[in-house]
Image (cartoon, helix red, strand yellow):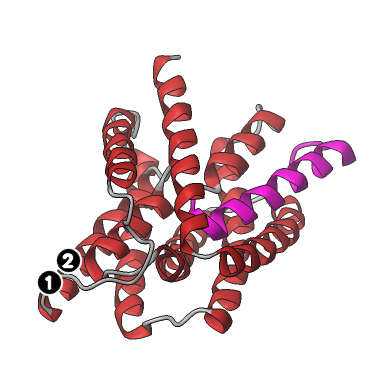
Amino acid sequence: MPDITILQILILSGFAFLAGLIDSVAGGGGLIQLPAIMAILPYAPVASLLGTNKLSSSCGTGMAVFQYSRKVPIEWKKVLPIAGVAFCSSIFGAMTAVSVPNQWMRPLVLVLLTVVLIYTILNKNLGVRVHEVSFSFRQQLGLSLLAGLVIGFYDGFFGPGTGNFLILALIGIFGMDFLRASASCKIINLATNFGALILFGSQGAIFAYLGLIMAVFNMAGSYVGVRLAVLKGSKFIRILFIVVVSGLLLKQCIDYLL
């Protein structure tokens, strides 16, 4: 691990807390934590920074899953198969990222995030409450597994906006509200994070000491975030979701232009 001061650790811990809070409610924690690590440790190997980020975020996501499972009804029979598929495809995505440049993904992500933002804003009742969908059980199963396959690979290969895409997919396919979609999303996110973490760990690309310190604060942020989400409900999560997607879209635009 590179030399790092106590002040730098404290700054990264603060960002980890904020990332855990935001990610547990509406997704998009990577928008906060990963850029912070790269800014504080600009000369460290990128793979090690990615691995450290995954260690911290995996622990925070695990905390969110534990808290949500105690407070929100989760349809495990629907979510676990998606998580299994996403876990496998995230490993394949991470392996692909090692050998294939992923910069061409940025323009596509800009388009997808723009569509997600516009669609969410125009559909004011989207995810506000649980609603019926027109898909049959087999159609739901097929679409959800496909979503897990594609989004899981994307998370391992590139990553930004994974939680946001998952939440919208769960709302669209199963008719969940934002609260249940956020809770279910964390289970799938935990699977994709763990898949990528295994790959980075096998290559020794993790600053374990720093990652574990950040993990404590990420878990604390997730704990606060879940309590806030359950207290405020789906309307609050929808607003935060729009804010996070807007911020992520703005960041991707800036990165692409620069």
* Circle on res. 214: none
- Considering depth in this image, is 87 or 126 the residue closer to the camera? 126
Classify the position of the N terminus by image quarter: top right
| Dominant SS type (magenta) | helix
Vertical position of residue 72 compared to residue 198: above or below: below
Amino acid type assigned to the residue bearing label 1 in the image:
Phe
Q: Amino acid at mark 2?
A: Leu
Upstream in sequence: badge 1 or badge 2: 1
Residue at the location (17% across, 73% down)?
140
How many labels sit on residues?
2
Residue 81 in the magenta stretch? The answer is: no
Q: Report the residue at 27% width, 71% height from top.
A: 131
The 10 Å Cα crowd at callout 2, few under 14, some 14 to 19, many 20 or more, is: some
Q: Secondary structure at mark 1?
A: loop
Q: Residue at x 73, y 59 (%)?
A: 212
- Left-right relation of 49 to 246: right
Task: Point out the image quarter for the C terminus.
Answer: top left
Using the numbered discs, state the Cα–Cα distance from disc 1 to disc 2 in whole angstroms: 9 Å
Query: SS at mark 2?
Result: helix
* Image: magenta residue range: 1-27
Q: Identify which residue, 80 or 226, lies in the foreground.
A: 226
Q: Which residue is mark 1?
A: 135
Q: Taking 43 as reference, is 171 above or below it?
A: below
Give the image location of residue 73, x and y in percent.
Answer: 45, 82
Residue that label 2 marks: 143
Q: Is residue 227 left or right of residue 159?
A: right
- Residue 162 as seen in the image, left or right of residue 233: left
Are circles 1 and 2 on residues that touch, CB within 8 Å? yes
Residue reaching furthest to the top: 258
- Expressed as whole percent of the image width and height from the top left, the position of residue 167 reads 37, 59
- Work out whether 113 lies above or below 164: above
